[in-house]
Each structure stands twice: as C-alpha cells, then as structure tokens.
Image (cartoon, helix red, strand yellow):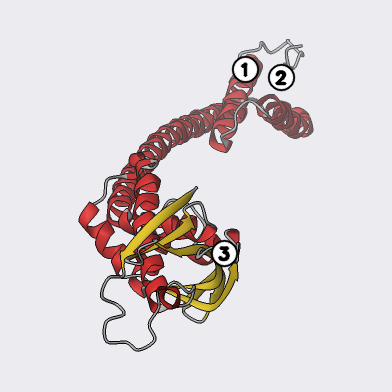
Amino acid sequence: MNKLGIILMAGLCFGAAGCTKTKYAECGSPEAKKVIDKLFKEELEYSVQNELDSQKQLGSYDSTELEDAVQRLNISLDDVRTSRDDPDSDRYSCSATLKLDIPDRVEKEANETRAMAEMVNVRKLANRYKMKRKGQNYTTDFDYFIQPTDDGKKLVAELDDDAPSMKFLGEVLASYLLSDEIREEKIAQDQAEAAEEKKKRDKERAEQEREREVDEAFNAEASADLAAAKADRKLASDRIGAVWLAMPKDIQQQLDARHSSWVRSMKAKCKLEAAGTDIRKAKREAKELDCQTRLVRSCAKTLERNISRGRYNSQVYYCRFNR
C-alpha cells in the first residue's frame, strides 16, 4: 500500500533567483529527500509497532524509546533516477539506492536478542530481504513518487510501506527494543533450567548413594557369610583330622590313597555346586565352603565307625557321596 507524506514548501523560494516549484519537486532535491526521510520514519514506526504487537509474548516496549531509535537512524538516497509517468503532470516516479546506517549498539543488541530467541542474525536477515551489506551500511533499491500540490506550497511523497527495507528495519528495531525483556526472560529461563538440572543431578546423586549403600550392604553380607563359612570349614577340618588320628594305624594306611582322591572329588563337586549361584564372588566362595563343610562332617561321622568297631569286625567304613 502506498503512503503519503507532505512537507510545506512555502517560503522555500524566497530570495532564490530562478526558483520554481518544479525544481523543488525533483526526485533528488533536498526537499524531496527530506519528505521521504520523514515519511519513511513515520511508516517505520508503524511497522515496528505492528511487529512488536505481533510478539507480545516476548515482552513490552517503551514507545518513547521506539521513536528515539527510529529518529537516530541515518537514511539517505543515493543514485537517484527520475522518470515522468505523464509529461503533462508534475508527478515524478523516482528510483534510488536506499542506504541505511544502523547504529552499532542497535545492531549488536538486536543480534543478541535474536540469538536468544533462536532467530537469524541481522546480516542473514538482510540477505532474506535482499538488502546488501556495504561497509557499515545496508543498501537496497527503493522506489517512490514526488508531486507538488497545485499551489506549490506543499510537496507530496508516496512510498510503499510494504517495501523489503521497511520490513527489514521493522524486525531489527523490534529485536533491539525487546532486548532487555528477552534478556531477562532468558536469564529467568536459564536459571529455571539450571535449577531443574541441579534437581536432576541431586536426584541422580541420591540414587547413586542409595545404590552404593545397597552394594556395600550386599557385599558386606557376602563377606560375613564367607567369614562364617571359613570358620565352619576349619572346625570341620579339625574334626575329621581328630577322627583320622583316632583310627587304628592299619586303617589309616588302607584309606590314605582313597582319602586323597575323595578330597579332590569333594572340592570339585562343591565348586560345581556353587558356580553361578550368585554374582558376588565372596558369596560363591561361602557356598562352596558350606558344601565342603557339610561333606567333610558327613565323612567324619562315617570314619568314626572305624574307631568303635570290634576286634573281629574286618569291615572298613569310608566316605561316600549321596546320589
């Protein structure tokens, strides 16, 4: 949509020789550039307001700060070209290179805001709107119309408020004006995320501590069982040793080779019985020793019969595994 801008021209020609209203209505005249600058900034304010209103969820803005930011923009028209739509009309169709000088602070804070909002930076935004970066400025082609009023007292300008340059600056200034709001929101968000992360870490640490305590208790149980199993195994060994020494010498000689073989078989049997019964090594060792204790006690009880046998009893008793 084209927007109109008007500037008073009364008195501009006083004291100037050869002054005509047509001269002041040329596309590149200071008066034409002045009215375009005024109209462009007015429409830019509206554009920024619309942009900000569409992003109310990001925060509010100060209208005075908006006006100040717009007025501090340096807008210039270079390489002005003029063509008449109608030779009989004073209305001029104009083309120029629009040069925008955005203050460093504005661009810097706009970039920070856009980064926090996960939006492209100003330079990439300029590319999107076909704006060219030239030194510290942004440039683009720009079209407008200039026409004096019939009485020559006013100069009327028209421009397209939907121009890419207008949209570009609208987004940049909106990002700049919301920088404090978004920064505070980002800080609050980061703090909330940090608190949530801390809560998560604390929970994980508590869980790890609980698991550690369970593991310690789990392993302590196995260690205690192993200690008890070792004590019981020693008592069983002492008992069968005493029984062995109490048997007659001739019986000891008869059973010596068989006993060594039985001991090897007993240990192998108990190792197999304990294998895979628990993930804890100490617990498996305890089960293995418990098995040995049970079999050694049984063997000692069987050997005791050789001690109390009668003189005429030639039978020799020895250990067997229950099937």
Label 1 sits on what residue type? Answer: Ser
Marks 2 and 3, the one that precedes in the sequence: 3
Q: Secondary structure at mark 3?
A: loop
Q: Which label is found at residue 54?
A: none
Q: Disc 1 versus disc 3: distance between alpha carbons?
A: 131 Å
Q: Quadrant of residue 172?
A: bottom left
Give the residue number, with chain letter if any, for mark 3: 88
Q: Which callout, 2 or 1, points at the residue further toward the start of the chain?
A: 1
Disc 2/disc 1 C-alpha distance (Å):
8 Å
Judge whether residue 102 can be spotted in this image. no
Residue 74 drawn at (x, y percent): 37, 74
- What amino acid does circle 3 point to? Asp
- Would you place residue 14 above or below residue 51 in this image? below
Q: Residue at x 36, y 50 (%)?
A: 46
Question: What amino acid is found at the position of numbered circle 2 in the picture?
Answer: Cys
Q: CA distance from mark 2 to mark 3?
A: 134 Å
Numbered circle sitting on residue 298: 1
Give the image location of residue 226, x and y in percent. Answer: 50, 33
Residue 153: quarter of image:
bottom left
Tag 1 secondary structure: helix
Label 1 vs label 3, nearer the camera: 3
Residues at circles 2 and 1 in contact by the CB criterion of under 8 Å: yes
Are the residues at dot 1 and dot 3 in contact (C-beta closer than 8 Å)?
Answer: no
Q: Residue at x 37, y 74 (%)?
A: 31
Placement of the C terminus among the 4 image quadrants = top right
Q: 59 above or below 293?
A: below
Question: Dot 3: few (<14), some (14–19), or many (≥20) neighbours within 10 Å?
Answer: few
Q: Which residue is mark 2?
A: 319
Local secondary structure at mark 2:
loop
- Which sits in the foreground, 289 or 180? 180
